[in-house]
Image (cartoon, rainbow, N blue to C red):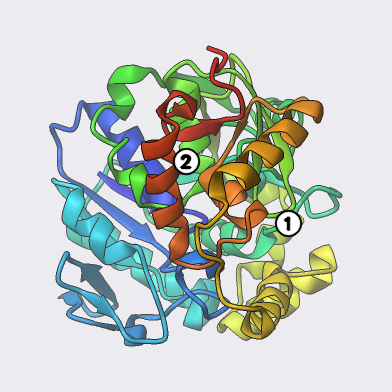
Amino acid sequence: MVFVAAGGGGDALATAMLHRAMTGGSDEAVIATYAWDRLLIDPLPGPRRPSSFTGLEPVGHHNFAVSGTTSAIPPAGSTLPRLAGELSGIRLVVLDPGGGAVGMREQLRELVDIYRPEALQVVDVGGDVLAEGNEAELRSPLADGLVAAAATNLDVDVDVLVAGPGLDGELAEAYVRERVRQLGGELMAHLQGDAIEGFLPILEWHPSEATALLVAAASGLRGTVEIRGAGLPVRLTEHSADVYRVPHQALQAASPIVSALVGTQSLGEAEFRVREACGFSELDYERAKAGKAAKDDPSRECGGLDERALRFEREAQERGVDFVTFRRLAEALGVRGADWGRLRAELVRRRPAHYAPPLWAVSADPAR
């Protein structure tokens, strides 16, 4: 099977989970994905290209696969090599947005020619790939829109799979489900414990928030979760572990973002077209945040950690919050960069009753 992880970051991990749910993990899979880990892992804004890595394996003429021995060339960082080393039966291929949608389409055509899948599956956690571009909550139209544009005019059926509506903190769950209905989509699956079995250890080091929420929902957690540095609230509901299938052709016909990106031949052109369609690009935010991080003081030590965590938890409870992601907690406590993993391990060691894998409960009695 051939999948395309639409947003980079944790979408590749979520795609591996969907593959497990769809096949039981018995078939091998290829997942084409951005090397785009945002700023927690990679200090450079935007996606990395294959030239940012050593140890890639050529796949045909246009594609390169990541292995456990692949390395990002500093100062770039990437979770893909470690993820590739821990996902058995799955080959991760790096999407190169440097050639815009046109260049990525050549990559996908080659993968289809090599692996001959019955269909190409584009996977997005949250559902912002279904956006029209004028939604006030939309924050990252470029990554998903460029993948959807690249998947046009292929000699194979293409489906868009939306997992965990609303879990990325962008479009609301109800809005995503309505967009699925408008585009002629359908409920394909509801993830449960067997689909996430074996993936929790990966989320002990992988920083994806949306995929962590998808795993939390599949494991039965319910309630309000704060994510990201801004503390966006996301609600885990009975629909949060749902997976919907939308015909790509319907999305292509209805999406101004996809239409604007189909003919782009560079990342710069794609960003320009997205800015025309939506008024912004997520790269604006990443550049600004990267510039700010360069001026910030180094990460705090864990001194006074318990007191700071308790104060944050009391304030979160007053806001009606049940859980937080570890990324949100790290930023709230002033721990930056790679030190978030150290913070996680230290908190779990000191106060295990608050650990509701893969989230942190603000009380010691998490809702299920």
Residue at 45% x, 63% y: name it: 339
Residue 78: percent from left, percent from top: 37, 69
The kind of secondary structure element at disc 1 is loop
Q: In the drawing, what numbered circle is on residue 183? A: none
Q: Is residue 94 visible?
A: yes
Residue at 70% x, 40% y: name it: 311
Report the quarter where the N terminus lies: top left
Residue 294: percent from left, percent from top: 63, 84
Callout 2: few (<14), some (14-19), or many (20+) C-alpha neighbours within 10 Å?
A: many
Callout 1: few (<14), some (14-19), or many (20+) C-alpha neighbours within 10 Å?
A: some
Residue at 73% x, 43% y: name it: 232
Q: What residue does disc 1 label?
A: 139
Which of the two labelled residues, at mark 2 and mark 1, occupies the earlier sequence position?
A: 1
- Name the quadrant containing residue 133: bottom right
Q: Is residue 168 depicted above or below 195 in this figure? A: below
Residue at 36% x, 63% y: name it: 108
Most foreground residue, 306 or 156 = 306
The kind of secondary structure element at disc 2 is helix
Residue 159: percent from left, percent from top: 47, 40
Q: What residue does disc 2 label?
A: 211
Q: Is residue 156 visible?
A: no
Q: Is residue 278 depicted above or below 271 in this figure? A: above
Q: Is residue 155 depicted above or below 76 in this figure? A: above
Q: Amino acid at mark 2?
A: Thr
User: Alpha-carbon distance for marks 2 and 1?
Assistant: 17 Å
